[in-house]
Amino acid sequence: MKIAVTGKPFVGKTTIFRALTRAAEDHHAIDKPNIGTVKVPDRRINYLSEVFQPKKTTYAELIFTDIAGFEKTATSLEKQPEMLNQLKTAEALSVVCKLFDQDANFSPVQDIEEWESELLLSDLQTIENRLERIYKSSKGKKLRLHEEEKKLLLTCKETIESGTPLRALKLTGTEKKLLSGFQMLSIKPVIVIYNIADNWLGKSESELPNISKLQAYPNMAVTSICGEVELEIAQLDESERIEFMKGMDIEEPGLNKFIQASYGLLGLISFFTVGKDEVKAWTVKKNTEALNAAGEIHSDIERGFIRAEIISYEDFKNCGSMSEGKKKGLVRLEGKKYVIQDGDIINFRFNV
Ligand SMILES: Nc1nc2c(ncn2[C@@H]2O[C@H](COP(=O)(O)OP(=O)(O)OP(=O)(O)O)[C@@H](O)[C@H]2O)c(=O)[nH]1
Ligand SMILES: [Mg+2]
């Protein structure tokens, strides 16, 4: 799962990226993004690891990319294929807004609207290109598949022309599939990150200046971070970090909030496998069935699936051990069609 860190120039994207990935340097050139992997913090994994004392503990991961800022110019994205590619191949976009410069006049709502309008322009271009190709290739004939696609694309076009991102559309499964190949930008989930000054730390997003008018669309989350402080925290070692955070009255790094918000926004959940060798978090989309979850681990487990032994994290924590869970009848046997729940601890039985 890849999330692009985007926004206007000099708003703190690279600072936040470096804090996220604990990357020491800013490597990126204008046409080359920084790419980094980030562990998804999860207290449940910490606990399971304490209980099982495994040789290896593996957290879920997200990939972040940091690209150059983009300005408001009608053709900017189309003329920057590498940047456009980074945006198109990301599952979600985060947009950083500068709120740290005390002297400046903030206009985060306008910043986000301008940023969004770049996405809309790019999508409009994609749609127009495709419509033109359909007209050309059908040569006046009405092909059923093309008609469906055309109708959907025209709806998208209308939506965009009214200034609304495609995120706002209610689409059926088939329509989503039809659109997926185009990698439209304005349909991607968005996380707004307010990069705030450190004296705003601890205040809720609604108290920040000038942000009340932000249009709320579905699949949009808002969080605030102080990029500079986060980078400082990230560069400290474990013991110094705790001291520093105490001193600043911070309970948890703001980045954790952001990472967890991203995870939720992408509709992702975790299930766990446990044992002496490894305690591991696996990432699946909500509504994934047991058989597909098994396939995430290994195709053999999917192929030879017999059943899944499952205990929820909460039940496990209340019992303290697997054998106690079994005694109390909290370890369930589930079949292929069982829908995985966030926090399930699973042992797959299989035979190949
Ligand atoms: N005071 C303050 N300064 C910050 C904060 N975050 C970033 N900066 C400063 O803002 C400047 C730009 O930060 P970058 O992280 O390079 O911004 P960017 O968005 O990656 O910039 P481009 O990649 O050039 O578009 C740097 O001088 C940072 O030190 C913050 O939270 N507080
Ligand atoms: Mg940068």
Image: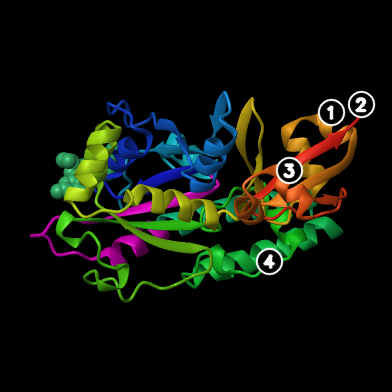
Instruction: Evaluate if marks 1 and 2 touch, with contact meaning CB atoms under 8 Å apart.
Output: yes
Residue 199 visible in the shown view: yes
- Which residue is situated farthest in the left direction here? 103
The residue at the point 36 percent across, 39 percent down is 20
Which residue is at a point 85% across and 50% down the rendered structure image?
333
Q: Which mark is residue 171?
A: 4
Kindly check if marks 3 and 1 are in contact, taking CB atoms under 8 A apart as contact: no
Query: Callout 1: 10 Å neighbours few (<14), some, many (20+)?
Result: few
Residue tagged 3: 323
Image quadrant in which the N terminus is located: top right
Mark 4 vs mark 2: in front: 2
In-image side of 183 versus 201 (left or right): right
Instruction: Check disc 4 and give the amino acid type.
Output: Leu
Amino acid residing under circle 1? Asp
User: What residue lies at 51% left-to-right and 50% top-to-bottom?
Assistant: 92
Q: Is residue 113 magenta?
A: yes
Alpha carbon distance from label 4 to label 2? 40 Å
At which x and y percent is residue 203? Answer: 25, 66
Nearer mark to the viewer, of 3 and 2: 3
Sooner in the amino-acid sequence: mark 3 or mark 4 = 4
- Residue closer to the observer: 221 or 254: 254
Circle 3 Cα neighbour tier, 10 Å, few/some/many (<14 / 14–19 / ≥20)? few
> Which quarter of the rendered picture does the C terminus lie within?
top right
Q: Is mark 1 within 8 Å of ligand 2?
A: no
Q: Is residue 96 magenta?
A: yes
Number of numbered tags placed on the structure image: 4
Q: Is residue 170 left or right of residue 96?
A: right
Instruction: Name the N-terminal-most of marks 4 and 2.
Output: 4
On whether ligand 2 comes within 8 Å of the CB at mark 2, the answer is no
Label 1: which secondary element: helix
Of residues 113 and 234, the one drawn nearer to the viewer in this rendering:
234
Going from the N terminus, do you reach mark 3 or mark 1 first? 1
